[in-house]
Structures are given as C-alpha cells and as structure tokens.
Image (spheres, rainbow, N blue to C red):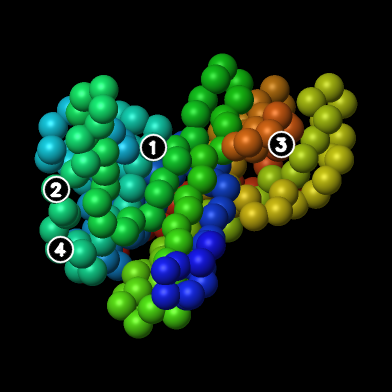
Amino acid sequence: MVGATGDTAMMTAIELLFTLEDERVFSGILKAHFPKVIFVDGFTWPTPEAPLKKSLDECETVYCSIWNRDIYETMKPPRPRPGGGFSGPTVPTIQFLRGRFTDNILRAGRMAAGVFDNDPGELPMLSFIKAVWKLAKKFAKYRADFVDPVTREITTPRAYNTIVGPDATAWGLADGNRFFKNDAGNFFLRPSAEVKPVKPPKVRRK
C-alpha cells in the first residue's frame, strides 16, 4: 500500500482466540496502560454518534475498533450510508474482529491496523499499535496446533501468527471435543498440549 506522498504503509495483523472473559481482561489491560482507550461497537451505526463501550466484551457486534482518544480526541462527522445509517470510525483505530462460538468450536478473531510509517504525524499511532501488539502477546502467550479433527494428531505445530487467551486455552483443554478454527480458513486447531491454563494476570489500574 502506497500513499499519495509515496510513503509506504505499515500493515500488521494477528489472529486471536479470545473468549468473552479474555476480551474483558484484555480490555482492562489496555485501559490500565492507556486510560483514554474506548471501544467502538461496529462499523455501521444507526445514528451519527459512535456507539461506545467500556470493554470489548460489552460490544454487541463482531466488528469493533480500539480508539485511543489520547491520540485522536474527537471523531469527524461519520459518512452517511446509501441504505441508511452511518459508517465509521472516522479516525485511525485498531480494528478488532471478535471470536465466534458455534457449539464446540471457537473461530478466531483478528486484530489489524495500518499506518503510513514515513509520515511523522503517524508516529503516535504507530507507537500505540506496537504497544497494543506487545500487550496482546504478553497476555495471550498461549499457542495452538493444527490437528486432524478425527484422530487429534498434530498436523502442523504452533499455528503461525495466532495467539490464544488464557480462558480460551482453559476452555479448549477442558474437553477433547472442543476445537478452534482459524479466521479465514476451515482448519481445526487445539491448544498446544504442553501448555497448562493459568489464571489471567490481575490488572493494576492507575
């Protein structure tokens, strides 16, 4: 991706396997480090005002955004949609696709963001993105393996660019008939066998 000035865009994404509890704890971690972080519920809104939530697990839609109001204090007026409603957010945010449960399967969500890394004006957002990725990997330091859903044999260990929350890990290990699936594909995963679930870390609030 190249901007009008010729700057190249830094794009980054990671797949997440989070339960509602993982979303709640991760939201608390983000707000402890960035007190003005708020979560935008959805990309299409019935009114011009962004639907804001205090935590990811409070969102009603699958598509959410992480908005740091320390960087962008207010949003611009949203764009009207041809069929009604409005589109947003209208400031740079981190996109957060939430995981989805179907019976005994948890399908991965995704966190993604991009900025023009040669633009000095983007440096605060670039720093924020890197910090959020670091916090996510520290919190969700668990891994999953691709497996055959019938034999449970590992076909590919350590799914690339995929992190698993502690509650999702505990959920998967509690029952051998529970599986993860990656976001875009249709492959089955299980928590890495040697990983033992632990209690999520306590969040120290400022």
Q: Nearer the viewer, mark 2 or mark 3?
A: 2
Sequence order check, earlier mark of 1 and 3: 1
Residue 188: x, y in percent?
Answer: 73, 32
Badge 1: how crowded within 10 Å, few (<14), some, or many (20+)?
some
Query: Taking the image as drawn, is residue 173 in sight?
Result: no
- Helix, strand or loop at disc 4? loop
10 Å neighbourhood of mark 4: few (<14), some, or many (≥20)? few
The answer to whether residue 202 is above or below residue 172 is below
Left or right side of 115 for 88: left
- Mark whose residue sits in front, 3 or 4: 4
Residue drawn at 20 percent across, 35 percent down: 80
Residue 71 spot, x, y in % from top left: 23, 69
Q: Which quadrant of the structure image shows residue 130?
A: bottom left
Residue 31: mark in rendering:
none
For image coordinates 26% across by 66% down, the residue present is: 34
Q: Which mark is residue 63?
A: 1
Spatial distance from mark 1 to mark 3, Cα to Cα?
Answer: 23 Å
Q: Which residue is mark 3?
A: 189
Instruction: Report if the CB atoms under discs 1 and 3 are less than 8 Å apart.
Output: no
